[in-house]
Amino acid sequence: MKIMIRRSPEAGLSIYVPKKDLEEPIIESEHERLWGGWIRIANGWVLDLPEMASDTPLPITVNARKRGEGADER
């Protein structure tokens, strides 16, 4: 699924999912550099992010894969 990742002073890192009209903060990540691992957002979803350079500028739109519940929402 396409998500936008951005950084804001209030929420830190957050994602926006246009098809779901969903915006949630990122509360946990597998890697400090964010890319190439999973992230957990406030609603409980776990998303796999693509491998990218650690200095990739934000905001950015990427394809992420939702884990769990047997659902694949690509």
Image (cartoon, grey):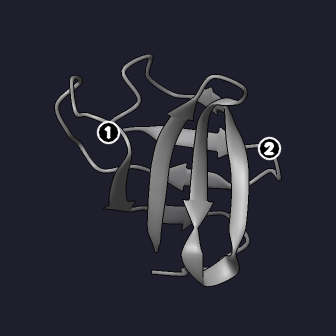
Q: How many numbered marks, from 0 up? A: 2
Q: On screen, 62 above or below 46?
A: below
- Secondary element type, mark 2: loop
Q: For the residues marked 2 and 1, what is the alpha-carbon distance in whole angstroms?
A: 20 Å
Horizontal side of 14 relative to 21 (left or right) equals: left
Q: Disc 1 designates what residue?
A: 36
Q: Residue at point 52% right, 32% down? A: 7
Residue 62 position, x and y percent, is: 33, 60
Q: With 20 as the anchor, is 33 left or right in this view?
A: left
Residue ranking furthest to the front = 9
Q: Position of residue 64 (x, y in %)?
A: 43, 61
- Taking depth in this image into account, of 59 and 74 the one nearest to the observer is 59
Kind of residue at badge 2: Ala
Amino acid on which disc 1 is placed: Gly
In the image, residue 41 above or below residue 34: below
- Considering every residue shown, the one lying at the far top of the view is 32
Which residue occupies the foreground of this view, 4 or 44?
A: 4
**Residue at image x 63%, y 22%?**
9
Residue pictured at 41% horizontal, 30% vertical? 34
Secondary structure category for the residue under label 1: loop
Q: Which residue is mark 2?
A: 42
The part of the image, by quadrant, that contains residue 16 is bottom right
The local crowd at label 2, few if under 14, some if 14 to 19, many if 20 or more residues have their Cα within 10 Å, is few
Vertical relation: 43 (above or below) 52: below
